[in-house]
Amino acid sequence: MVNVDALNTLARRLSPGAMITDPDLLQSYRQDWSFDPAAGTPIAVVRASTTADVQETLRFANSHNVPVIPRGAGTSVVGGSTAVDGAITLSLERMKSIRVDVSSRTAIVESGAITNDVKAVAAREGLYYPPDPSSYEICSIGGNAATNAGGPCCIKYGVTSDYILGMTVVLPDGSVAELGGKRIKDTPGLALTKLFVGSEGTLGVITELSLRLIPQPPTPHTLVAFFPLMADAVAAARDITSSIRPSELEILDNAAIKVAEEFLNMELDTDAGALLIGRSDAGNGAETEMNLMSTLCEKHRATATYATDDPHEGELFIRPRYAVYEAFEQKGVVIGDDVAVPIDRLPELTDGIADIAKRYSTTIVSYTHAADELTHPVLNYPIGDVAAAESASAARQEIYQLVSTLGGFAATEYGVGQDKRDRLSNSLDPVVSKLNRTIKNAVDPNNILNPRVLIPSSGSTDGI
Ligand SMILES: Cc1cc2nc3c(=O)[nH]c(=O)nc-3n(C[C@H](O)[C@H](O)[C@H](O)COP(=O)(O)OP(=O)(O)OC[C@H]3O[C@@H](n4cnc5c(N)ncnc54)[C@H](O)[C@@H]3O)c2cc1C
């Protein structure tokens, strides 16, 4: 464990007020949104204001063998920014500047900027930053880059990595790499920018990003359709995505419809097996796309379809998708997973999850981004109910087992974090696993960066 004198020396090299060691203040940096009760306590938090602060911190940590947990806004739901005893938590929350260059349609943003602020500054210039994780109002752009965050619009616009042109990243030894640039095809050599996207703070600390912006799309038209069975909705979704690229395509299962109806009271069909919500922002082509979606839903036995070009009505139509999470938050603990199975096996997945929920007497709803086959099973139980928490945990294990049986993968959107690392190491192809470890060992030989996240290092004690 590093001593106080050494920490004080580091504090003097940093921007004024950057280091926190007050035990009360350290508490608020222990957990992220995974709310792990076993989260550690950092020996110090560094709130960097500059890239130089990050360099000083990493140089210090590397030479004293102190683990470092990079932290954006702390919204990880898989323990990506959960603190570790004896580590320094390196927060980017003070680095928030956002500059838009209209002529090159790019934004230069510091990592701690909140995603919604990036979107808003771009929108003021008539430009659009598409990636839309549901947490966009509270998460940071650096955290999005580190987890390659995605959201409903990825069906048409892609995920965070599709918008990162370049970055400034500080390596574990304190050196700075400037990767990529303002142009889509900018630098020779390996595609190193992509290597750091999704690396979950294990290879370097990103301090600045160059982001690609696109013109603002037109206001979307919205369609909802109810189906007797999940299989019908899946068949419709498959036909829709073979014909057009909607700007969103979501499917809710029966349990999700019921929770949304209880919360919103908007006369949703609670007997339906599935609710499909589709959107088109194709401007003059949107009406044609809506008509096609309606036709394909009816071909696959939709019992009712409604479409609207009215933006306010459209927001109402899409409300059930987001209401599920809000409804659960009011009731207690919410645990969302991010699993993926081949789309044809989605009915087996949602039926299986409904069966697991019944057996464990717990509530589990599922909603799916239909284009990328990503399903969120979401569990809910009262705060402080230990038995219910244990049931939920056992139910989740069964869901992961089911996903594996159906040829799927149990960590697809939120990242791997500390929570899912062991599961990942068991399911990765051995050659891929070795390649991951080789890269980690080459870039971070002392294993100081987020040592419990993502990649188990060979025979390691996790650097702690
Ligand atoms: C209600 C809710 C809804 C969500 N919905 C979505 C969703 O739709 N899609 C989705 O993808 N995720 C979603 N998430 C998960 C989470 O918001 C994302 O993973 C987000 O990208 C994390 O950003 P953050 O700034 O909070 O990062 P943190 O939680 O602080 O960190 C996340 C990971 O990134 C690393 N990291 C953070 N900043 C940096 C940096 N500057 N340099 C290097 N590494 C860094 C951390 O070490 C950690 O491993 C949701 C979370 C919540 C609570």
Image: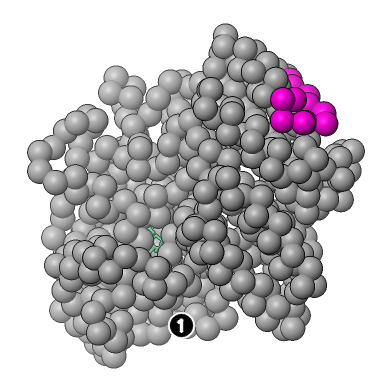
Quarter of the figure that contains the N terminus: bottom left
Expressed as whole percent of the image width and height from the top left, the position of residue 365 reads: 72, 56
Please name whichever residue, 111 or 441, is drawn nearer the observer in this view of the structure. Answer: 441
Picture layout, residue 410 above or below residue 62: above
Name the residue: 16% across, 33% down.
Answer: 186
Residue 131 lies left or right of residue 302; in this view the side is: left
Query: Where is 413 relative to 239, above or below?
Result: below
| Residue found at x 89% / y 38% | 267
Q: In this view, does 355 lie above or below 5?
A: above
Q: Does the magenta stretch include residue 305?
A: yes
Q: Quadrant of residue 434?
A: bottom left
- 167 sits left or right of 335 in the view: left
Reading the image, the residue beneath label 1 is 40
x and y percent of residue 407 in the render? 49, 58
Judged from this view, the residue extending furthest toward the left is 189
Front in this rendered view, residue 461 or 96 = 461
Q: Which colour scheme is used?
A: one colour
Taking the image as shown, residue 338 lies to the left or right of residue 437, namely right
Element marked by disc 1? loop
Q: In which quarter of the image is residue 278?
A: top right
> Residue at point 18% right, 68% down?
438
**Residue extending furthest toward the top:** 284
The residues colored magenta run 298-308
Q: Residue at x 21, y 58 (%)?
A: 170
